[in-house]
Every structure is written in C-alpha cells, then in structure tokens.
Amino acid sequence: MSGDGFHVHGPHDHAVEHASHGSDGFSNNIAVMTAILATVGATFGYLGGATQNDAALFKNNAAIDKTQAANSWNYYQAKSSKQNLAELAMSLPGIDPKKYEADMARYKSEKEDIKKDAEKWEESSKEWNHKSDEAMHEHHQWALATTAEQIAISLAAITLLTRKKWMMGLAYGVAGVGIALGAFAWFHVDPVGQMLAKLGGGAVGH
C-alpha cells in the first residue's frame, strides 16, 4: 500500500513485470502474449458493454411503444362506447334513427383508424423487444469471449511461474476459443443456437 492508495495488479501485469527482469525468450514470449490478450480482452469488454447499453435502450423503446399502444386501445374502447350509446339511442321509441346515423358512421370510421394506430404501436414494440433480445444475446457472447481471454491471461501467468510449455499451449488454446467467440459475436453468428435449432427440427421431423 502506498500513499496514493491501494492498487491491485492484474495477472498480465505480473507476467510482464516478471518477464522484464529476465532475458530468456520464453519469458519474453509470455510477456508479449499477455499484453496482446489484455488488449483483445479489453476490446471485447468494451463491445460487450456497448451491446448491453443497446439492449437497455431497445427495451425502453419497446416499453414506450407498448404504452402508446395501450393508450390507443383505451381511445378505441371510448369510441366503441360512444358508438354503442348511439345504437342504443336509435332503438329508443320516439327517436329519429337518422339523427344518429352520421354519429355511428363517424365513430366506426374513427375506430378503424385508431385500431390501425394501436396495432402499429404494438408491432413496433415487438420489433424493439426482438432487437433488445438480440443485443442481449450478443452481449452474452462478448462476455464469454472476454472471460476466455481473462482465463488465458491467468494461465499465461501460471505458465511464467511453472515454465511448463504444455501450460503455454493450454493458454493459447483458451485464447483461441475466446477469439473465436468474439468473431461469432462480431459476425452475429450463433453456432450453438443453430445446432439446437437443427436438432429440434430433426426431432420434430421424426
């Protein structure tokens, strides 16, 4: 602890610091590897945060449009009530039906326009919800990719301490998995979902 406060170093910081005191190629390779993985992981983390923000924004837009749809349906019900009252008045004895025919025609026309407006808002709400779900799924992909890079950095730090080449290979393998997950997120590819969809389709076919 210093006078400026407590600072926690990440695994890659220790790896780079340790490598800087050595002159062998093995340590230097680990140092370069951890620096690259830290950069890749930070990029994945930023993209994951951005997609999470997008998902929240889309969900908020869906809620706004859902409220607009509810208001339109309430207005539609109010017009329906007025139309029903006009129909009731026409059936009363001593009342000239022609006096309310124009009102009924107007309410009917207004109801159709209001109904279309309400359905439009409902459809828009569904689209925003769909976009929000897609953004959250992409966020989870970025989060998995970031986690894989963090695990690879930790394995690299362990490799530096144990100096086991097989451990370095494991670190490279985990890093490769993280990069692949990041590529899937970037290109909006969901191999797991596609595989499950195929299995589900096969099960339905049988």
Image: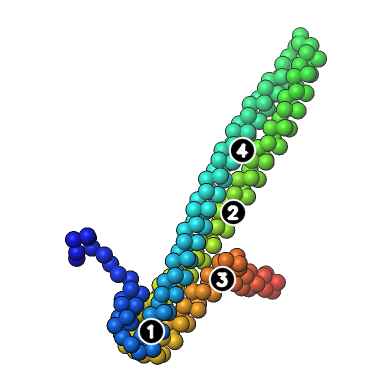
180 left or right of 158 in image:
right
Residue depth check, mark 3 versus mark 2: number of the one nearer the observer: 3
Q: Name the quarter where the N terminus is drawn.
A: bottom left
Residue 91 appears in the figure = no
Which amino acid, by three-letter code, is at mark 2? Lys
Circle 4 residue: 69
Distance, label 4 to label 2, CA atoms, is 18 Å
Distance, label 1 to label 2, CA atoms, is 44 Å
Between discs 3 and 1, the one toward the N terminus: 1
Q: Name the quarter where the C terminus is drawn.
A: bottom right
Distance, label 3 to label 2, CA atoms, is 20 Å
**Residue drawn at point x = 35 percent, y = 89 percent:** 24
Which amino acid, by three-letter code, is at mark 1? Asn
Most distant residue in the top direction: 94
Residue depth check, mark 1 versus mark 2: number of the one nearer the observer: 1
**Residue 202 is drawn in which quadrant?**
bottom right
Can you give x and y, in whole percent of width and height, for residue 170 in the image? 43, 84
**Residue drawn at point x = 49 percent, y = 74 percent:** 178
Most distant residue in the right direction: 98
Residue depth check, mark 3 versus mark 1: number of the one nearer the observer: 1
Q: Nearer the viewer, residue 50 or 117?
A: 50
- Label at residue 28: 1
| Label 4 Cα neighbours within 10 Å, binned few <14 / some 14-19 / many ≥20 | many
- Label at residue 131: 2
Q: Are marks 4 and 2 in contact (CB under 8 Å)?
A: no
8 left or right of 109 in image:
left
Looking at the image, residue 125 lies above or below residue 6:
above
Can you give x and y, in whole percent of width and height, for residue 148 in the image? 45, 73
